[in-house]
Image (cartoon, coloured by chain):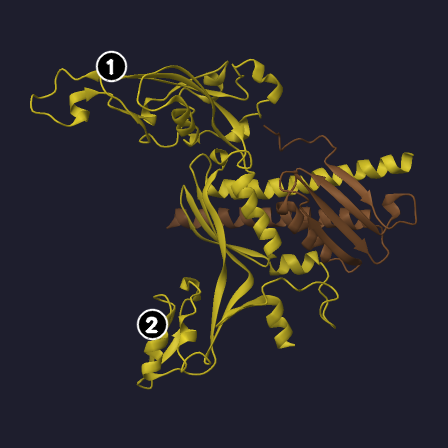
Amino acid sequence: MTDPDNKSSGRLGVVQTAQTTDNWDKSDCVTFVMHNEDHTLGNALRYMVMKDPDVEFCGYSVPHPTENRINFRIQTKGAPAGDVFGKGLANLSEVCDHIQQTFKDTIQKFKEGMDTQ
Amino acid sequence: MAHVEDMKTRVRLLEHGVDNVHSSSFPGNYVGSDDSWSMDKFTKNFRIDVISLTHSELEFDMVGVDPAVANAFRRILLAEVPTMAIEKVSIFNNTSIIQDEILAHRLGLIPIKADPRIFEYREEVNTGDETGTGEDTIEFQLKVKCTKNPNASKDATDPDELYKNAKVTTEHFKWIPLENQEETYGPKAFAPVNKDILIAKLRPGQEIDLKMHCVKGIGKDHAKFSPVATASYRLMPEIILNEDITGERAKKLQQCFSSGVIDVEKRNGVPVAVVACPRRDTCGREVFSHDDLKDCVKLNRIRDHFIFSVESTGALRPEVLVSEAINILKSKCKTFQQDLDMLGNQNTDT
């Protein structure tokens, strides 16, 4: 059985495409390989990245149903794709924080309402 | 402008199809509108309303979030929130008519009342020894033998009266504490969620004797680990009447929708149709098959208004499951943020 809480790194890989510079982290066009992920994170993250005005193109694919990974491609209008990727992740995690907080508050209020009735 | 706003926020139901299915509010799509991400805008628009909550079911509205994010929560609820389920069964004796492998599979699907958050994942490497530890395993025993009931009345025909233990149910499960589980969690900490799940039927002389190991796992690995019976959402329907619909047509309109969706009010003595409760609509398109009504009604669904329904199998409360799902999505982001940092550092080192 796989451990989904596995905090150890190694689930992220990088494929450089159409490049002029040597370092991928300065490149504006990078494919990130995300191991052990599927549409759950892929689609949510694609949405967050596409919301960035610096992004020219963002898409992901599941290369094969038996391979447990996604290829997540970002092409920017000049900004380093790695930075945009990180920003997308940061935004998504901020969204999660807000949803969590709102959800907990609402449930709390609802339970208090039930008690007083 | 109103048209653009409609395209962004509404899914349109037409007579022969559905329009504006995909989210389109991305920067660069619409001239003159700022669609870039803004946390302020999001927090301003986002809200959650709880509709109903019981020990096993939760219905709530999540408003102001893109389908991509809402769907992530739904998928995580189904496949990635862990629970405990029976994974290994050691059968010492099984003389019932159910084959060992069928019995083991059946046992696996029984929901177990145990908080998975207090357990660790059982390591693949350690499966060589079959015992497991107090941190990663719950052990149950099922030892049932069917016998004749000497006190049964002469003319009894009911097997439950004729025999003892004719039915093996989850009530026969006996928890065997491992290590110091009993001291830590109490004397009756773990058991199946329901006591009346039928596992097998026996006749005198037949016997089942086995031990089971529950481990922590996720629905992706096997559906038995899925913590929900269902976790689904639908979009909030919106019904717009373009004109006053009166008299017989009002009655006819009402008939086109689920009960309670359209009300017929008397206005100056004339019956007039009004939209009462769009939530109850099932988004049928019957109204479009009536030529005299189809141009008076606009059917939409609100793109960012999700009506979530979560039904727990019983191990954790539904509101806890949703909360866990949000945490899991967040931890995915954190993991990849860390990985990105590490990759970036490697790159600058070389």
| Amino acid of disc 2 | Gln
The residue located at (30%, 85%) in the rendering is B269
- The answer to whether residue B271 of the structure is visible from this angle is no
- Counting residues from the N terminus, which is met first, the one under dot 1 or under dot 2? 1
| Amino acid of disc 1 | Gly
The residue located at (73%, 64%) in the rendering is B27
Which chain does tag 1 point to?
B
Q: Against A102, is B164 above or below?
A: above
The residue located at (87%, 49%) in the rendering is A27
Question: Where residue B227 sits in the image (x, y, percent)?
Answer: 48, 38
Question: Where residue B235 sits in the image (x, y, percent)?
Answer: 51, 60
Q: Quadrant of residue B24?
A: bottom right
Q: Looking at the rendering, in which quadrant would you find the N terminus of chain B?
A: bottom right
Secondary structure of the residue carrying tag 1 is: loop
Say whether residue A44 is left or right of residue A77: left
Q: The brown chain is which one?
A: A
Q: Read off the residue under disc 1.
A: B205
Question: Where residue B177 sits in the image (x, y, percent)?
Answer: 45, 16
The residue located at (13%, 15%) in the rendering is B150
Looking at this view, is B205 or A29 the one in front? B205
- The answer to whether residue A19 of the structure is visible from this angle is yes
Q: Which residue lies furthest to the left in this view?
A: B154
Q: Residue B255 carries which label?
A: 2
Q: Which mark is residue B13?
A: none
Q: In which quarter of the image is residue B54?
A: top left
Question: Where residue B179 sits in the image (x, y, percent)?
Answer: 50, 13
Q: Please tell me the colour of chain B.
A: yellow
Marks 1 and 2, how far apart in space? 61 Å
Q: Looking at the rendering, in which quadrant would you find the C terminus of chain B?
A: top right
* Other-residue count near label 1 (Cα within 10 Å), few / some / many at <14 / 14–19 / ≥20: few
Of badges 1 and 2, the one in the foreground is 1
